[in-house]
Amino acid sequence: MNKNEWIEKLSAMAASSSLVESSLYAKYDVKRGLRDIKGKGVLAGLTQIGDVQAHTQVGDDESELGPGCLIYRGIDITELVAGFMADKHNGFEETCYLLLFGELPDKNEMERFQNLLSSFNTLPDDFVHDSILKLSSRDIMNAISQSILSLYVLDERAEDISIPNVLRQCLQLIAVFPLLVVYCYQAHAYRFSNKSLVIHSPQPHLSAAGNFLHMLRHDSKYTPLEEQLLDLALVLHAEHGGGNNSSFTVHVVTSSGTDTYSAIAAAMGSLKGPRHGGANIKVVQMFEDLKKNVSNWDDDRQIENYLIKLLNKEAFDRAGLIYGVGHAVYSVSDPRTLILREHVAKLAQEKGLADEMRLYERVEKIAPEIIGHERKIYKGVSANVDFYSGLLYRLLDIPPELYTPLFAMSRIAGWSAHRIEELANSSKIIRPAYKSVAPRRHYIPIKDRKKS
């Protein structure tokens, strides 16, 4: 038996010995995925940073499913977006301030905060060459995580978890994240796709969205609408309550007393997973397959037939999923989707892709009905933020490899706020219980062990 065959046999043993009989979860009332049978999350902590709501209160002890709400520090996301758009300024930096410090900045505070971020908007000498270009990775999320851990090496106070020092580290990470994302992509494109290597330095007067587009594009050109919509996407992805997988990871890892860079790298590992941050790529790929198989985009029957094939594992990746539809919390609607749809339609019109936008809107309307009928889901499902964010990024000519890194570039704001919150509130390590269901056995001397 050669090495690979031996590993194959051992892996089968490892998987078999790890399987838990599914009926035991019900027997011991285990909340799989920390959610009960109705999908409600187990209360594992308290937060003042963000809230995700899918129910409307109708009595003292009663609630019913209603439109989804996303709330940042007590402010509804819809109101927040409407506010900074009416004022005609970018919202991501303002949102970072709100999430970190619990209140909206006045004009003077906003200016000082932007200057503070600009002062951190640089990487150490030779960092790009030595840490990013030399160690380019096939996966950009892993490359960014590697760069984050490299910043640990260069931080003389890396292990200091006092809140002033952690805030300094978080502000630096928020500021340099656009650089890490773009430079790791450029290194990847140069090494693995034989593309030209163009490295632009960030401009201190630009927003996070503006700097990203400036550094990504060879000619550094972008329209005001492009910057506005990328900034909007950053705001909508910045926070989603303490229970989302990556923010919960930050709480868990921070509770161990570890350093900021390790906590954020752990969150990156969580977000990289296709069940969390990678879904928007799947939405775009799914639509490309749909366009090949649906000849008339205005024919609802053709679209329905394709979606049924998706659910029956007969189309696209045969995973049985309609990507971008459904959410662990939202049922009636995802507020981020409602906001994004309206504004993406403007960019689609500008880019001459209004027909494709209408196709997305048709699928958004039809898919929940198909899922409800085929899967007998009666609580309702709706399109989530991934449904339109992938389309937005494609309209912005952003490479698919950057869709999930862009999510991270935004969510670093929420992760930073949750890390500080955990440090401010608790000195206990987070350690939930797992019940062992393995049978008790006795040690047998090796000479007496008999295997078939």
Image: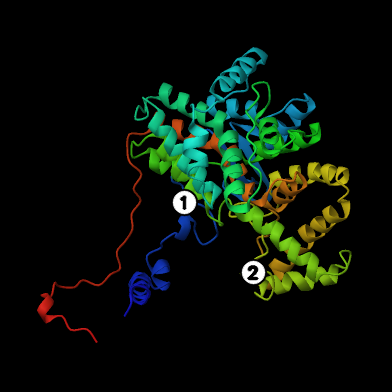
Q: Is residue 61 above or below residue 439?
A: above
Q: Quadrant of the C terminus?
A: bottom left
Left or right of 93: which side holds 298? right
Q: Confirm or deny contact between disc 2 and disc 1 (CB under 8 A).
A: no
Tell me residue 281's x, y (percent): 65, 55
| Between 238 and 196, the one nearer to me in the picture | 196
Q: Where is residue 147 in the image (x, y as percent from the top left)?
A: 48, 39
| Mark 2, residue position | 317
Element type at mark 2 = loop
Q: Report the residue at 57% width, 22% height from top.
A: 117
Q: How crowded is mark 1: few (under 14 residues within 10 Å), some or many (20 or more)?
A: few
CA neighbours of label 2 inside 10 A, class few (<14), some (14 to 19), many (20+)? few
Quarter of the N terminus within the rendering: bottom left
- Residue 16 percent location from the top left of the image: 36, 75
Q: Specify which label sits upstream in the sequence, 2 or 1.
A: 1
Residue at the spot x=47%, y=23% of the render? 168
Q: Nearer the viewer, residue 111 or 340?
A: 111
- Mark in front: 2 vs 1: 2
Residue pointed to by mark 1:
42
Q: Using the rendered view, name the quadrant where residue 15 is placed.
A: bottom left
- Determine the CA span between mark 2 and mark 1: 32 Å
Q: Residue furthest bottom?
A: 452
The three-letter amino acid code for the residue at tag 1 is Val
